Image (cartoon, grey):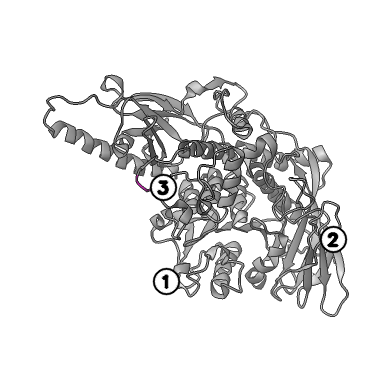
Amino acid sequence: MQQRRWQRATSSVVGALTLTTAFAVAAPPALAAPPRPTPVSVFPSDSLTVADPGQVTGRRVALPTRDCGAPVSCGLVQQLNQLDGFDLDPRIAVRFTRPVDPAQAAAGITVEGPDGERTGVDRVVWDPSTKVLYAHPAEQLAPATTYRLRVADGPGHRPLEDTFTTMSAPDGLLDLREQIDSGAAFADLGITPGLQVDGVFPAAGLGVSLVQDTAVSGADTTTPVVVPQAATGGRVVFGSFEAPSWLRDDVTIEQTPTRDDGPEPVAAERLPFVAVLPAGEAPAGGWPTAVFGHGFTRSTADVFLAAVVNARSGIATVATNVVGHGYGPGSQWQVTPLGGPTTTLPAYGRGVDQDVNGTVESTEGSSATGAAAAQSSRDALRQTAADVMTLVRSLGGSDVDGNGSVDLRGAGVTYFGQSFGAIYGTMVTGADPTITRSVLNVGGGPVTEIARLGAFRPLTEQALAAAGLLNSDDPTRNHFQEQLPLRGEGPVTVTVPGAVEIQEFLARSTWLSRPGSPETFSPLIEPERAVFQVAFGDRTVPNPTSYTVIDAGDLWERTSLYRNDRTPQAGVNPHGFLLDLATFPVAGVQGQTQVAAFLGRGQVVDPDGAGGVWEVPVADPSVLLALNFEQPALRP
């Protein structure tokens, strides 16, 4: 899978170098040629590591820690120095003796793997003030692998070469899954996998409201929020399950040497679930069951919208909350059956008051804090992925109404996730073969790029402000100008003071977060197990980030593109099309129909048949290299 992409990249690089060589031979000798620029140093390099037999790679990063900048930046370096190698998409830096033509210099850079496979570079930046050329490999690299970085025309007309080793990025989550599979995580904490049912109600005419616990005191400070739902399904089940947690108070998971079995769990946590069951009697063995993963700022309440077509198709849908979501632990459901009294049930919110301002926000508790802030949501995503694995293993033959027959089938569990749910869902699908099939809707990665390019750009602004790196007075840019090209764009020459420092901080933050990022795990997904749904012009999870995840796993044949630009909703951000049935009544049902067909039968259907709104598979993956919407913050 990855080998095919490497061969494709190698051909283009070799062709470029051949043309350059042919031109040099044909050109007449110069009478007095100026001194040529020569590469004198490169990054990454294994010279910036130390031997560590406790690591899978046998190495550990050892970046200099002097003059590291603000506390957040210093904390970032200290955390990078715990890793067992460099990023899977490293920011390559080559210093030259003299100014270069960026495109020509980039054509002379190759990254070669242990079997001779090679790729060129992309996303090129030239800093004339330091004579350093920055770039990234054209293809994502494999984990725990030693590569040779080669730059043409080095000293003595010989290539400048060095080696570097990538980190074993998937290792941490794989360790957690193995602890779950072996039962060690449950035994350590006294957990017996299974569901605790708090209430079962008929779906028809059911009224559901969520009382959001936003006050640290636990007092009711908000009126109940009515949960939108379709009158679909037979019964709705509310309850909880216990799951092992590896998260510490600062929303990080202990970084242990990668050759060991991973950190021990630190606590048992009771998590919510809500299940929507189809109408009628469950078949023998229970209803086929799909786990739904909700988006950023959302909660289990979205399962009522996500289950619409599944319920009609005979599939039960169950959801839980992401780390830091669902507001505070005092959140409650108010459930009112048709013609019956209202019942109040615990909703098990997972939010915490991290900034100690007395309120709990919709995502508060989903990002690391303090010196570990640069990790962002890395470990919250890994913990959420582990929670989904635990939920899957807690379903086994569940009798939710106590009538002695199985309602939820534990075998062959499937998954579908929207937005954030597709991000950690890609991680789950790659790391856990127990998941039979997955549909991953409008996901992307890495998270740092999702934030920088789209609607969550203010989060990047906050991170850069904490690091003291904001370099613009322009609020339309969110007070920073990074001058970074997208994949496939031409080289950028830096002209804005502070842009290089921002680029470095973002690259290092991405490196640190890679173990909890979906593109790390998409290469582990067998194509027949997944379908990816992408919305053209998505302003929340921009198309280039979806490209990154899908291309890393070479999963283009499993990618469906919803062309919102060809519909009456063309001017609307299409990110929420799957669940926002009020705005996207046709596309939402079409998308969910594809979900149900794949989860239930393993069949990939074209939701609009011969129509032109859905491309199944995507006709031209390169259309996702561009944002496909106007982003004023990125203007030159």
The residue that label 1 is drawn on is 612
Residue 430 can be seen, yes or no? no
Q: Residue at x 69, y 45 (%)?
A: 383
Nearer to us in this view, 146 or 106: 106
The residue that label 2 is drawn on is 220
x%, y% of residue 88?
50, 37
Q: Is residue 94 above or below residue 607?
A: above
Query: Is 68 displayed left or right of 15 in the figure?
Result: right
Quarter of the view holding residue 369: top right
Which of the numbered marks, if any, corresponds to residue 262? none
The residue furthest bottom is 339
Of helix, strand and loop, which mostly describes the magenta segment?
loop
Q: Residues within 10 Å of mark 3 (few under 14, many from 20)?
A: many
Nearer the observer, disc 3 or disc 1?
A: 3
Nearer the observer, disc 2 or disc 1?
A: 2
Q: Are marks 3 and 1 in contact (CB under 8 Å)?
A: no
The residue that label 3 is drawn on is 487
What is the CA distance from the residue labelled 3 to the residue labelled 1?
27 Å
Check if residue 487 falls in the magenta segment.
yes
At mark 1, the secondary structure is loop
Q: Is residue 630 above or below residue 505?
A: below
Quadrant that contains the N terminus? top left
Nearer to us in this view, 526 or 276: 276
x%, y% of residue 242?
80, 49
Q: Residues within 10 Å of mark 2 (few under 14, many from 20)?
A: some
Question: What amino acid is at disc 2?
Answer: Asp
Q: Which residues are magenta?
A: 485-490
What is the CA distance from the residue labelled 2 to the residue labelled 1?
49 Å
Nearer the observer, disc 3 or disc 2?
A: 2
